[in-house]
Each structure stands twice: as C-alpha cells, then as structure tokens.
Image (cartoon, rainbow, N blue to C red):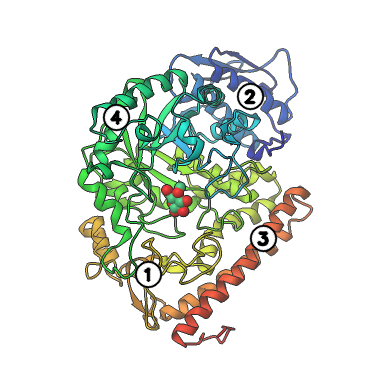
Amino acid sequence: MNASPLWLDFRPRPDLPLWTRRVTGEVTSPQGKAALRELRQGFAALGAEAAGDGPCLRLREEPGEGEGWRLSAEKDGPVLSGPGRGLVYGAFALLRKLALGEAPVPGEEAPRYPLRMLDHWDNADGSIERGYAGNSFFFREGRPVCGGRTREYARLLASVGLNGCCLNNVNVTGEALYLLTGKYDGELRAIGEALAEYGVSLWLSVSFAAPLEQGGLPTADPLDPAVRRWWRETCDRLFRAVPDLGGFLVKADSEGRPGPQSYGRTQAEGANMLAEAVKPHGGRILWRCFVYDCTQDWRDLKTDRARAQYDTFAPLDGQFADNVLLQAKNGPVDFQVREPVSPLLVRLEHTKSIVEFQLAQEYTGQQKHVCWLGAAMKEVLDFTGPAGTVKDRLSAVCAVSNTGDDFNWTGHDLAAANLYTFGRLCWDPDLDAEVTAREWTRLTYGPDPLVEATVTDILLRSREVYEQYTVPLGIGWMCDPPTHYGPSPEGFEYDRWGTYHRATCREIGVERGPAGTGYSEQYGPALGAVYGNMDTCPEELLLFFHRLPYDYRMRDGRTLLQRIYDDHFEGCAAAEAMAKAWDALEGRVRSDAFRRVQVRFREQVRSAREWRDVVNSWLYRLTLIPDEKGRKLYL
Ligand code: GCW
C-alpha cells in the first residue's frame, strides 16, 4: 500500500530480550488476534529471530470490553494479560518500549478516558474540509469505502491509544446525508469491522434536519412525536446494521446548520431527543458547542463571539441526558494559535464534556508550516478553573484529524507528531508532552542523536515561532479569509464572523474585561480578575482580553508595538534557522523523507517572511511609528 508506516516502521535493535523470539497466546477475539499478530510482526521487524522453544512472551486474553493491560514477569518469560482491546494497547506499548531501546517493566496501564477519538471532516465526494493531506480515504466519489488504508489507520490509532473515529464532516451535505438511511449500511459495516479489529469505534456526523430532508417529514422539531419516532426507528435499523457504531456527532445551530433553535427549542431538547434514540443501543451523542452568531454586523460593538458558547450552554448545565457529551473546542473562538481555555471546560458542573482539539492546522500553518501542538494541548488539559482542572473533569477527548490519503498521511511529515502526541495525551494526560515529541522523533527517524536533538528542538519551538511571525499576544484573525492561510491583517475586519481586532492608528484589540464585553467574567471571580486586568493578564493573551494603545508598556519595558514588530522579526528568523537546522540533517534522514520536509520548510520560510512584512508594514502605515531597531518596514 502506498502509505508510510509512520512511527510503526520498526528497525532492528541490538538489545532485544530473548523472549521476543517466541510469542504464544490464548486469544479468541479479533482484537486479541490482532495483538498477537502485531507482536509477532513487530518483534520480527525489530530483528528478533523466531524460535520454536525457549523463553517467550505469553498473551492471556481475559473476558470483557475493558481497555487495560498488565505485564507480569513469570518464570519462562513475561505474560501480557487483559481483555482483547487491552491486549492491543499492551502489544503496541511493548513494541514502542523495545523500539525506543527501553526495557519493558512489569506493571499495568489503562486509559484515562473511555473515549479518545478523531473527527474527520471528510465529505462524501472525497474532499476534506480544512484538509491539508490529500483526499479522504474513507470516501470516494460519493460513497464510503473500506480500503487498504482503513485497517492501517485503525492500527495507527490503536498504536497511540485512540479508540474512536467519526467518519464524516460535521457539515453534513451531499451524499453524506444518506449515511443514515440504509443506503450505505454495507460499506459502513465493513469500515466498522475493520476499525473494531483494533478497538476503534465508528461514529457518524448527522444533520439535525434529517427527518425533514431524508425522512420526508414536515418538520425536524425535536419535540414532535413523529420526529422522535423517525430517529428511533432510524437508529434501531442503523445500529443493528452497523454494530460497531458508537453514536453521533452533531453540529447544530452553528454556521448555518439546522438545529433545535429553528423550532424554538433549546440545545438540551435537541440533544436529548437524539440521546433517547441511540440509548437502547448504548450509543452516545457528541453535541458541539460551536454555536455563535455568524452573521454579525461589524458595526455591532456589543456582541462578542468569545462569549457565545458559554452564554448558550452554561444556563443549560444539568439538563442534558447522561449519554450526551458537550463538545467544546479548546478555546472560546476557533482554533487560533493562542486562545484562553474555553470557560465551558472549567465551569460546567453537571454535564459531561469532551474537548475538541484541531490537529488539522487550519489556522496554524495548514501542515505546510511545522507547528507542534503537543504543549498547547497540554496547557489546556492542565488548566485549572473554578470547577477544577480540565483533564480531571473531561469525560472524553477528541481532535479534528490531520490525515488524508497523502503518502505520509499528514501532508507535512512532522505533522504526524501531532497525531502521535494527541493519542498519547488522550491515553494519559499526565504525560510530559515533550517526552512524546522525543519518542515520536526516535520512533520515526531512528536513534541518531543529532536527528533526535534537531527534530525535537524544532517541534518544541515551532508553535511559539509560528505565533511570533503570525499573530502574537492572542490577537488572532489576521489570515486570509477564504483560505485561512497567509496574512491579511484586515481580512476579517468587516466580515460577518465576529472576529475583529478593531485596530486604529492608536489602539488595537477588543476589551473583554469587565469594562468591555465582560467575557473575562465567565471564568468566575478569581480567574476572571486575573484576565480582566491588563496588569495581571498573561502577556501571551494580552490582546485577546484587552484593547490597548500601541505605546502600552509591556512587562519588559518595550512598547506593545515594538513587541509586535520584534516578534515578527524574531519569529521569522527562527523559522529560517529551523529550516537550516533541517538542511543539516541531509544524509541522516532517508532522502525521500528529507526532501519532503525540506520542500515544506521552503514554503514556511517564504510565508513567514510574507507574514512579517505584511503585518509589520500594515502597523507601520497605521501608526507611522518606526521600528526602534531601524529594520526594514514598507510604506
Ligand atoms: O472554523 C470553522 C472552519 C469550518 C468548520 C467550523 C466548525 C467544519 O473554518 O471549516 O466547519 O469551524 O468547526 O464547525
């Protein structure tokens, strides 16, 4: 198959324990069998010579659906035990350890969250919304397909601990509207089975208007008995036909999608109606919170998009059925390179929540720029608000996938590190994200210390570098509106999306403290006070929360404007340095992989220079304040 094995490309190791020569197992489930196969194949790839007797690794499958595993030392070799799903994770954990040159030690592990999933924004026609790695491998020419990549993908997901996958775009259009109707049950069942072999459940995005659009009913009102019956009957059929279905992901009342609002019903009434229909089948509803006014008039200074999700959902806390999870993006607006943590994730007390990250780098360089998001995800998971720490409050974690049918799966080879780190953090949010970056590098490129040091350093610095040369200090939204790539400082200013910085020749930013939109108060009194005051607000978020004059003094004494100028110059220079550091790996990384990344770095450097010059020159033209260091700005 024309696809990279990514981090599962095991290379021979000199120091393998003898028991890797023989694996025996009492396994019965498809997952148990997959674990056995993976171990045999993996040990062979690591260089173990098969032996007919002597020490061995034994697999002991236990009954049940659990996902934990245990490694114990017995006389003639270790024993890996657990239910089938657990054995899959245990097998990959063992292989990872050995591939990293670490000795597996007895112990046990289980994932922190029961659901750890990837959301695909794949369309039925094979395109991917905000996809930067080719076309869909789940859909081709209007149909779902179970092809060679399906199983490989399931392996990749399981190897980092993920267990759910939503096949289609939350904007459900075209043929995807018929996934519910029975037309594609056979294909969905096949995909479901291929994923399930590695313990991955299949999910579908559905349109709230399906009873109207596909069911022929005159309404989709969630309180209408005929609508409720339609959903129940549809689910009864679908869950029977596709037994590995986990449930539905729903984007309702959001960016033009239908939802309960059209019928005067609340988000809870809408979600609960679907929850009731999937409940007999053990299904769950992932209800997105991305609800805001996307037809804002830029002249309206009162409406603040950052407030919208909390204002809509917080009053409904406690009203959602227990098989509903509220899915909130990590920040209150939309996957900008720097946003505060969504207050929904730290204030809801009685509702299950799932955080949505975006591995697809829509606003973070579109997998042309390297932007490792591990530390950013970790910041969110570790964030503490009034009701506790995010990672302790979540019921599940998901991310918009960054994969497609490109050979390397993720467009930019280094973007695979985001997929890897995401999986590892979902399994154990206490992991040090930096350790996972290093692991990924070693698994991907082998044990060369220079490669490891260079690539890890690039990954760890990449987000700050990207932030510096694009939109520092939390300002966001200076990208080109249709593509979301490249600079356009006023591109979103007079548009309908509620994404304004309202820069004049004197000031920049939206005041979101108590004297402004009051958004900071959504964090409760203590944290709200920190954000609401420009002197205590974390500097990296200063312009997210405050409107400030260009001569505002930053904590190090520089003016705000000088800081923005400096960031652009420094970020751009850092991008150039990263590209150079990569160049120095020529001959140490396989040549095809080396070239692919080199080509991406050329584009990153070109684009970084463009960002630097466009944003800095625009500010110079607005303010007529020159750079203190006399660097080139264009008039
Ligand atoms: O930011 C927007 C994206 C849309 C996306 C939407 C969402 C799937 O530009 O492409 O639609 O977010 O998250 O629903």
Residue 207's place in the image compared with 362, above or below, is: above
Q: Give the x, y percent position of residue 321.
A: 26, 32
Determine which of the numbered discs, if any, sits on residue 543 in the image: 1
Q: Is residue 24 left or right of residue 176?
A: right
Alpha-carbon neighbours of circle 1 within 10 Å: few (<14), some, or many (≥20)? many
Q: Which residue is mark 4?
A: 227
Determine which of the numbered discs, if any, sits on residue 39 in the image: 2
Question: Can you tell which quarter of the image residue 275 is in?
Answer: top left
> Contact (CB < 8 A) between labels 1 and 2?
no
Residue 158's place in the image compared with 475, above or below, is: above
Q: Could you tell which of marks 1 and 4 lies nearer the N-terminus? A: 4
- Residue that appears at 56% across and 69% down: 571
How many numbered marks are there? Answer: 4
| Element marked by disc 3 | helix
| Real-space Cα separation, disc 4 to disc 3, in angstroms | 52 Å
Q: Which residue is mark 3?
A: 601
Q: Could you tell which of marks 1 and 2 lies nearer the N-terminus? A: 2
Of residues 392 and 220, the one drawn nearer to the viewer in this rendering: 220
What amino acid type should be assigned to the residue bearing mark 3?
Phe
What amino acid type should be assigned to the residue bearing mark 2?
Leu
| Real-space Cα separation, disc 2 to disc 3, in angstroms | 36 Å
Q: Nearer the viewer, mark 2 or mark 4?
A: 4
- Residue that appears at 69% across and 63% down: 602
> Contact (CB < 8 A) between labels 2 and 4?
no
| Real-space Cα separation, disc 1 to disc 2, in angstroms | 51 Å
Q: Could you tell which of marks 3 and 1 lies nearer the N-terminus? A: 1
| Element marked by disc 4 | helix
Q: Is residue 457 left or right of residue 349?
A: right
Of residues 405 and 89, the one drawn nearer to the viewer in this rendering: 405
Alpha-carbon neighbours of circle 4 within 10 Å: few (<14), some, or many (≥20)? many
Residue 305 in view of the camera: yes
Label 4 CB sits under 8 Å from any ligand 1 atom: no
